[in-house]
Image: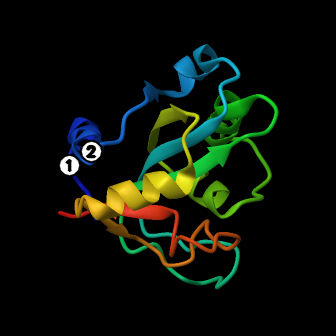
Amino acid sequence: MYEREPDSLRDCIAAAGVSGIWTVPAECPTLGDARGAYLLALRLPVERERGGPGRGTKVPAPGWYLYAGSAWGGGGIRARLGRHFRREKKPHWHIDRLTLQAAEMFALAVPGGGECDLVAKLLSSRRFRIAVAGFGSSDCRRCESHLLEAVP
């Protein structure tokens, strides 16, 4: 669980060697149509159940989490983050259920990046760990999870 300020979370991500373009919901349209990967940082205020495979599994605790995703389709990273930042949407992916409950969100866009590469870099830094096994990675043969938390 990560309870520190968002700037500390940004510092941990940078120290892990991950860089990109930081954005918040209001600035998302400035990303253009770049395609690649992103890290979505979200603060969950209370313990919630997650949807999808293994329904009923709890996110470990309130706090800050990182979700690694990819955006190679139309509209690129801007479109994908725009969806994540929207409050009114029909839940489709694992992460949708968490974004609907998040108290705060911001993101790091990584044009040309790969979500699995981001997860590997963050985990190898030992500053992050798997938050919920299998979360957001049901179609991934490389990663145990795409949802991470910072090591306190």
Q: Which mark is residue 9?
A: 2
Residue at horizontal 58 percent and vertical 35 percent from the top? 112
Residue type at the position of mark 1: Arg
Query: Residue 43 in the image: x percent, y percent?
Result: 40, 50
Q: Quadrant of the C terminus?
A: bottom left
Badge 1 marks a residue whose secondary structure is loop
| Left or right: residue 14 compared with residue 98 | left
* 48 relative to 115, above or below: below
Query: Residue 134 in the image: x percent, y percent?
Result: 57, 77
Q: Which mark is residue 89?
A: none
Residue type at the position of mark 2: Leu
Rendered image coloring scheme: rainbow
Query: Residue 103 in the image: x percent, y percent?
Result: 45, 46
Q: Is residue 70 visible?
A: yes
Tags 2 and 1 touching, CB below 8 Å: yes
- Would you identify the image quadrant in which residue 129 lies? bottom left
Q: Residues within 10 Å of mark 2 (few under 14, many from 20)?
A: many
Residue at horizontal 52 percent and vertical 53 percent from the top? 68
Residue wearing tag 1: 4
Q: Quadrant of the N terminus?
A: bottom left
Residue at horizontal 27 percent and vertical 39 percent from the top? 14
Query: Residue 31 in the image: x percent, y percent?
Result: 60, 20
Badge 2 marks a residue whose secondary structure is helix
Q: CA distance from mark 2 to mark 1?
A: 7 Å
